[in-house]
Amino acid sequence: MKQSLPGAGNLAFVEQLYAEYRRNPAAVSAVWRRYFEDLGGDGEWRTGPSFPPRSIFNPAGPPAPATEAPELQDRVQRLVRAYRVRGHIVARVDPLGLPRPRPPELDLDYYRFAASDLDREFLCEQMHPGGPLPLREIVQRLQKTYCGSIGVQFMHIEDVRIRRWLQERMERTQNHLALRRETQLRILTRLTDATVFEEFIRKKFVGAKSFSLEGAESLIPLLDLAIEHAGEDGVTEIVFGMAHRGRLNVLANIIGKNPAQIFREFNDSDAELHVGSGDVKYHLGYSGDWVTATGKKVHLSLCFNPSHLEHVNAVALGRLRAKQDRLGDAARERGLVILMHGDASFAGQGVVQETLNLSQLAGYTVGGTLHVIVDNRIGFTTPPGQGRSTMYASSVGKMLGSPVLHVNGEDPEAVAQCVHLAMEFRRTFRRDVILNMYCYRRWGHNEADEPSFTQPRLYDTIAKRPNVREGYLQHLRKLEGVTEAEAATIAQQRHDRLEQLLAESQQATEPARWPYPDYWRPFAGGPEPHDDEPATKVDRQQLVALLEAQTNLPADFHLHPKLHRLLEARRSMAGGERPLDWATAEALAIASLAAQGVRVRLTGQDTERGTFSQRHAVLHDVHDGHTYTPLRHLGVPQANVELVNSPLSEVGAVGFEYGYSLDSPETLVMWEAQFGDFVNAAQVMIDQFLVSAENKWCRLSGLVLLLPHGLEGQGPEHSSARLERFLELAADDNIQVVQPSTPAQYFHCLRRQALRRWRKPLIVMTPKSLLRHPQAVSSLDEL
């Protein structure tokens, strides 16, 4: 625009609108369109300016100067953006009301607005498409939307479609969900379930550890509403991961575990004292079926989890991925993972970042995870100022193109709005979403702990607060939505039921329950059986055909020139002219299993090519980069073969594959380390899950870890997968550890692992120098 445009020659806002108008006049409002129509093609006025009309920018009274109106509009736009970007900082999300600094960008003085400007009308089309609004009302709407019981971080999202989608849904409703009476009564009922359960446990089992949910009871209605929403969206499987805080409450009131069994576990003190008798009750998993209000059935699975908090995240994702693959759910629409985090662990543990990084990767995505941070703003005795360097525990989650919804846990209706928005977002964009629920921990780290030793003022404040149920009940009384008698009846019914179940727990034991899904029935654990030795050999002609099939490429595929030698070598092996090397034996093991209907999933660091350029299972066209995987084109009916380069992750990637193996026992699931010593970074998954799950939780796994073991002259780095460590861990038939030295041994080892009914993790110390050693070869006859 030229300087002849009155007062707006240097305003980016007006220039942007004018550029949009030049591209498409319909893209701007009618008011701006009339304004720009008065300009010639070169930006000169054709007639006197018709902008701004009194009804748009001015209240009744003297009009603003023509040069002032665009500048005022620009200031309003900057104010609106400031609320979208920083309104969450002053949102009333903290139930304890701890003060937080107010950004000056949210004050009218920052933009030099005078009191007389409050009644001027301004355009704010995304907020109010129906026309202009007085500045006073614009500010009120912004405060309700972004500074009430909900604060939202979403302007970091790069995708403008997602930002606009969120703005439209939040600003149209001012982030408030109008609830019907039956929904309000449902929320009150679920709060009552949570409250009565915790109080009952505390009174009946004095001094016992339960890691109470008190102070965060809104988690139960949150999960209730999320499951209902998911069921209506067509979800049939939900996998939950969480640490021990509130776990017993979730087991009893969401997953469906009989409280009588939980009471029996409280009385079984031996379970926490003797090695080999299981795990503590607040580490246990469970599964059950949920029927929604409209009759939709959803299967719920809560993953077992030791005290390593966030490490279960990757396991839960792997489990759901396996369930989706079993259902043929390639669109990732019928399953959901809900992960419940602690604020200190979400900010402090690196496995969180590793797991978040999996969310949009093709080999790992599950269609979006609902993350719920139960934000007590304390980790055992450590306050946020000593536990993280960020404003929020959720800050690491901003690495994803997803919103972070901060909500006051003492406002259950705001929690309901966040659940509704989060589930709608996930369904629309198939992305993770983070719900950070601010609450508090009414007692210490556990019920025997004294929190006022280290947080005396905080716990003095907490002691004076009523529970969440009481606060919500007072709110409903004011609305005349629920009577005192109704609320009392609900509470008494819950208490009476728990008393009855406590009596039952002291008289009888629960019938034995098959701890696995039905698809585990053909498989077994326990000591190694002597009658489970399947035939692992394969007919020579079939091996030749499978190997030759892997040397045939599409006519229009342009192979890297150096790889032609690889294909020629394999053709020679198929013809018996040269012996088989390590990578070829592996390819034949996978191919022969796929031809027998056994699915294979091989992931790891640079696994498609192989760390030592030995595998080349996925080939890349040198002209356009598209890929071709011969193992998926064997020329015979076959099961799926999935080969995936993992991110540069150990603990998260191993956890994912372990989870996958839990729900796909018929699949040969393998993870390969780039170098054997890299598995050191996954030691938590190995110690706490892989080698101990059968003993602690009666859960089996057939996961295979492929670890180049080294000790081949590379010094202390890349030298060893620590064979001795795995041998120390191998007790009570909990894992298998092997070190094959010929391709044939490796071939039979993999096939045996897949074809046996016995499911045990397998640790394979694979070689480096033996991959091409002239003496480490095998013949087709040996296979």
Image: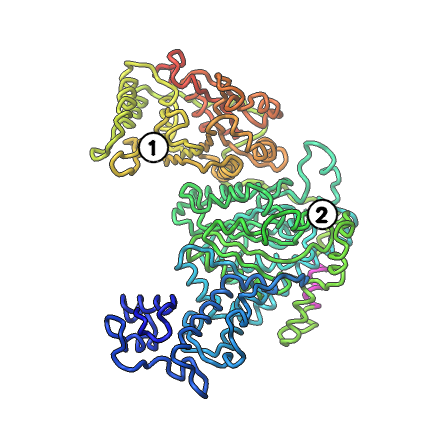
The three-letter amino acid code for the residue at tag 2 is Thr
494 drawn magenta: yes
Q: Is residue 16 above or below residue 34?
A: above
> Which quadrant of the structure image shows residue 580?
top left
Asked if 552 appears above or below 287 in the picture, the reply is above
Say which of 79 and 422 sits in front. 79
Q: Nearer the viewer, residue 511 or 358?
A: 358
Residue drawn at (45%, 28%) of the image: 755
The image shows a total of numbered marks equal to 2
How many other residues sit within 10 Å of disc 2, few (<14), some (14-19) or many (≥20)?
Answer: some
**Which quarter of the figure has residue 106?**
bottom right
Task: Judge whether 60 appears above or below 717 on screen.
Answer: below
Q: Which residue is mark 2?
A: 381
Q: Earlier in the sequence, mark 1 or mark 2?
A: 2
Q: Quadrant of the C terminus?
A: top left
Which residues fall within the magenta stretch? 488-497
Mark 1 highlights which residue? 618
Q: Any mark on residue 428, and which?
A: none
Q: Amino acid at mark 1?
A: Val
